[in-house]
Image (cartoon, rainbow, N blue to C red):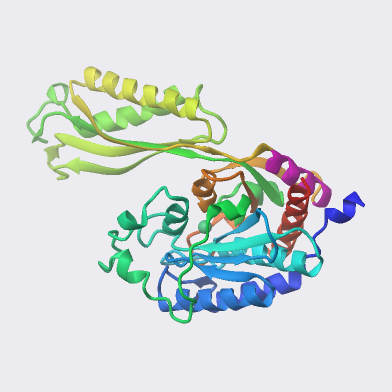
Amino acid sequence: LKNDHRAIPVQADRMLADLQTIRQFGACGNGVVRRAYSDLDIASRVWLARRMEEAGLEVSVDAMGNVFGIPPGDGPCLLLGSHTDTQPEGGWLDGVYGVIVALEVARASIEAGGPRIACVSFQDEEGSFTPSTGSRVWTGSLTQEVADTLVDDAGTPLAVARQKRGALPVAREVSPSLFSGFVEMHIEQGPVLDRTGEKIGVVDSIVGIRGQRVTFTGEQNHAGTTPMQMRRDAFQGMVRFVTVLNDRFKDVVGPTTVWTIGQANVHPNATSIVPGKVDFWVQWRDGDDALLDRMHEIIDASAADIAAEMQLTCEISSYSKIAPTLCFPAYIAAMSEAAEARAPGRWRVMPSGALHDAANVSVHMPMGMMFVPSINGISHNFDEDTAIPDLEIGLEVFAEAIARIAAG
Ligand SMILES: [Zn+2]
């Protein structure tokens, strides 16, 4: 009956055991150090590939080192997954929870004769070379040729690093056309679910990120002899700009909009010199492109106004833009129904403030994401953690959502 199709009988104990096993590759206190293409990363991929085979999946590892497990049978199927590489000081769940949950759902579905489900661990999501290298090359937003010229902190080109494959099988490419959609489970990496006591975040968008460099130039002068009313102090201009910007944003932004003034440089940065120049980076994020445009206008207008008011010159020298990505509405609906069935009243629809592989994959197919809570919102840190019961609820809700999506 219809409800029977809506349950893939996942086993939480087996998922948790796999999670603890892969944690040993690079374990460091409560956290993990497993950088892309390190010996530990390759060893963990070999282990993952074997677990996929034991589950009845056919393993393909492409030239980038993305590990795919594909179920028997024909026709497009759902692809689930995330990444298993970590930050230089990483948590034990960031990325890998989504991969192990994907493996458990694919495995349980084969055992129960359920829908065909594939799983993947994308390579280098954490940016040893550039953020989400593996999924960008797989989806074509970055060509292998260009990616190969990127170097890591040690100066090793990707072209060399990716030749290290250990006991991984010979490279075999996997076409995105094999898949009907992509769904990624991930820890939230922020405080929202932990603070509210909710168990599941159904992601509706992955935020867009805009940024630009602003330079105020005034007049560098003696800090003792230059009267206050004669100064053209660039640092004071930046401080005034930040205050004005926060004020002007107030009535424009939404509850999940964020903006950051970072990477500020004061010139010449000396105790007895009135700063003649300051440059800084303004970054702003939201899921709504039109709002990001509106914020951009406010930033430019505010910089111009402050420059005029304080007799500074203002220059905008570089600009970057990553568009927001919307999750597939039918996936949001299926996840919401599954969350309400298994964690009634204890879930929410929310944006993802961090970038994920799912944003790249969404170019080729419908995409969805789900979050579980992060204790105190901590991530990219050895102390990153999620309560075990929350990992179990996440698996159950995710499996039900996948069954609903697969049933159409
Ligand atoms: Zn991650």
Give the image location of residue 137, x and y in percent: 42, 55
Q: Quadrant of residue 130?
A: bottom left
Percent of width and height locating residue 319? 31, 35
Residue displayed at 70% across by 70% down: 15
- Between 341 and 231, which is closer to the camera in this rendering? 341
Q: Does the magenta stretch include residue 386?
A: no
Relative vertical location of residue 249 with respect to residue 224 in this rendering, above or below: above
Assign the C terminus to one quadrant of the image.
top right
In this view, the residue farthest toward the right is: 1
Look at the image and tell me whether residue 300 can be seen: yes
Frontmost residue, 48 versus 74: 74
Query: At x 68% / y 46%, what residue is drawn?
Result: 196
The residue under the point 38% across, 22% down is 297
Q: Is residue 248 above or below residue 147?
A: above
Looking at the image, residue 106 sits to the left or right of residue 162; the answer is: right
Q: Nearer the viewer, residue 104 or 363?
A: 363
**Could you tell me residue 162's position as x and y percent?**
37, 69
Tell which residue pokes out farthest to the front in this image: 74
Q: Is residue 386 among what the camera can see?
A: no
Q: How many numbered marks does the figure carry?
A: 0
The magenta segment? 330-342
* Left or right: 54 in relation to 62: right
Residue 11's place in the image compared with 117, above or below, is below
Tell me the quarter of the picture where residue 127 sits: bottom left
| Residue 21 picture quarter | bottom right
Task: Return the x and y of residue 41 as percentages of the image width and height.
Answer: 46, 73
Magenta-span inclusion, residue 338: yes
Q: Dominant secondary structure of the magenta stretch?
A: helix
What residue is drawn where x is 73% and y is 53%? 402
